[in-house]
C-alpha cells in the first residue's frame, strides 16, 4: 500500500471511501458516523489545509486519515500521560469495507506514528465512539491506552479518548 498526502482532486474518491465505510459501519450496528459526518465540506477543508493522507492499493484510494495537532476543546478534561503538549491527533481514519481486516487501518496508523515521530511529537491522541467496539479493540491492539471519555455531539453517546506515547521525555 502506498500512503501519500491527499490532493484536492482526490475529493470524490475520498468521499467514496467514507460512503463505503459509513455504510459498512451502519450495517454492523455502529452509528458513529452517518450522511452528515464526515461530509464533503469537512474533507474539502482538510485537503485545503494539507493534513489529510490517503492509502492506495493498485492506484485506488482505499483509506484516508487526517493527522494534525488540533484537539477538540473537550480533550482538555482528559488526564493525558503526555504532559508536554507535544502531540498529534488522528481524525477520521477510514477505509473501504472491501479492505477491512486486511491491515490497511494498521498501516495508516503506523504512518501517523512515523509522521508524529518525524515531527518530534511525544504522543498521538484520538477518540472513538463508545458504540464502535471494532475501533476500540483496534486501537487497544496497536498499544493505545484508553484514558477517559468526552461528549462531542449532543445527539450521540460518549467518545473514548486514547493516547499512545511515542517518545520518552
Image (cartoon, rainbow, N blue to C red):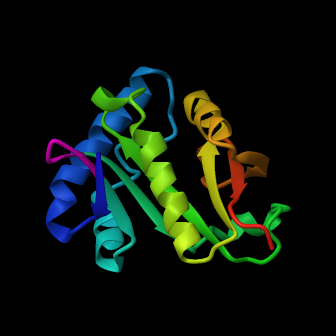
* Residue drawn where x is 78% and y is 77% of the image: 84
The N terminus lies in which quarter of the figure? top left
Residue 56 falls within the magenta-colored stretch: yes
Q: Nearer the viewer, residue 69 or 101?
A: 101
Q: Tell me which corner region of the image, top left, top right, bottom left or bottom right, holds residue 95.
A: top left
**What residue sits 41% from the left and 56% below the top?**
65
Q: Quadrant of the C terminus?
A: bottom right
Q: Could you tell whether 109 is left or right of 127 in the image?
A: left
Q: Residue at x 28, y 35 (%)?
A: 20
- Which residue sits furthest top? 28
Residue 16 in percent (x, y) is at: 22, 44
Q: Quadrant of residue 94?
A: top left
Q: Position of residue 17 (x, y in %)?
A: 27, 43
Q: How many marks are shown on the rendered structure?
A: 0
Q: Is residue 4 visible?
A: yes
Relative side of 67 to 63, left or right: right
Secondary structure mainly formed by the magenta segment: strand
Closest to the observer: 76 or 143? 143
Q: Position of residue 76 (x, y in %)?
A: 77, 69
Look at 71% across and 51% down and name the residue there. 161
Residue 154 at least partly seen: no
Residue 118 or 154: which is nearer the viewer? 118
The boundaries of the magenta stretch are 55-61
Does residue 58 show up magenta in the picture? yes
Looking at the image, is 108 positioned above or below residue 113?
above
Amino acid at each position: 500500500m502506498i500512503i501519500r498526502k491527499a490532493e484536492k482532486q482526490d475529493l470524490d474518491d475520498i468521499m467514496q471511501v467514507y460512503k463505503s465505510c459509513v455504510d459498512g459501519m451502519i450495517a454492523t450496528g455502529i452509528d458513529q458516523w452517518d450522511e452528515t459526518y464526515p461530509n464533503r465540506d469537512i474533507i474539502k477543508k482538510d485537503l485545503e489545509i494539507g493534513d489529510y493522507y490517503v492509502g492506495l492499493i493498485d492506484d485506488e484510494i482505499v483509506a484516508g486519515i487526517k493527522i494534525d495537532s488540533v484537539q477538540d476543546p473537550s480533550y482538555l478534561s482528559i488526564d493525558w500521560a503526555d504532559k508536554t503538549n507535544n502531540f498529534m491527533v488522528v481524525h477520521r481514519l477510514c477505509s473501504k469495507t472491501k479492505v477491512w481486516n486486511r491491515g490497511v487501518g494498521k498501516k495508516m496508523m503506523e504512518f501517523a506514528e512515523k509522521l508524529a515521530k518525524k515531527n518530534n511529537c511525544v504522543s498521538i491522541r484520538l477518540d472513538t465512539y463508545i458504540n464502535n467496539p471494532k475501533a476500540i479493540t483496534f486501537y487497544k491492539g496497536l498499544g493505545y491506552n484508553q484514558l477517559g471519555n468526552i461528549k462531542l455531539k449532543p445527539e450521540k453517546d460518549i467518545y473514548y479518548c486514547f493516547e499512545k506515547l511515542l517518545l520518552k521525555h
